[in-house]
Amino acid sequence: MKDIKEIMMEMDNIAEIQVAADLSEDEKEELKNLIHASTLGDPPPCGPCTDEVPYCCKVSIPKDFSANFTEKRLSVVSKLFCFVDPCPCDVTCTPSASCATTPITITLYPVRVIGCIQFIANASSLQGDCGVVNPTGLTPLSNATDKKTVTICCQGSLCVDQIVDFHKNAPTRDERKPRKIDCTNLQASIDVKLEDCNCGTPGDIKVVSFSGLFKLPKTCPTPTCAP
């Protein structure tokens, strides 16, 4: 229990995680709760080990707009943190075919990623019959392509608390300390589709669906030495 108390003391002093300037009070509390749930009570079940986080976000549009998604963009803010969990868990695995094939159980220490991924996705273009750009007052509508073409966007925030890898040895004090994962350490995909909506009003609206995956790093960031 000594190790768990130590890590909770570190969590109480958010400044020691070096993220105080990046988080709101609600986000700090959310982070502490996630770590609290991961490090107290009974040893956590390992559950699945995956470095993928799927997302899906949908926006409805009137049925008469035409869509041609020639460009898709994704903007991301990472509020993710990585640490090696001091609470071990049992993992069942099967040796390679060249060895015994009977499953064996081994005790490992999970590498956890916790926090959230905030994203805004957009795609172009949608076209109506007419439109305006940057009107300063009442402006005549135009049917020119550059006036009636718009983009559509969708946004969300994904909560993450998952195991991305395992360590054989118990973590050191430094490895237990959560470290921020910069967005440049993530990978992502984006797909945009126009779908009919089964919303009880067939034919009235369609849905623009944004979907894809975020891929998490399997290792925690290396600590930066102070100058």
Image: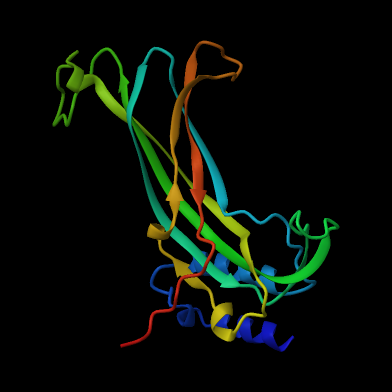
Name, please, the residue furthest toward the front.
98
Residue 149, located in which quarter of the rendered image?
top left
Q: Is residue 97 above or below residue 110?
A: above
Q: Position of residue 91 (x, y in %)?
A: 76, 63
Task: Count the labels in the image.
Answer: 0
- From the top left corner, tell me how far across and down residue 127 is, in percent: 30, 18
Location of the C terminus by quadrant is bottom left
Q: Which percent across, then down, holds residue 42?
A: 80, 71
Residue at position x 40%, y 55% in the image: 77
Which corner quadrant holds the N terminus?
Answer: bottom right
Residue sitting at x 49%, y 39%? 212
* Residue 8, percent from left and from top: 63, 81
Between 142 and 225, the one lying in front of the other is 225
Q: Residue at x 38, y 72 (%)?
A: 21
59 vs 160, nearest the viewer: 160
Residue 198 sits in quarter: top right
In the picture, measured across the screen, residue 63 lies left or right of residue 168, that is left
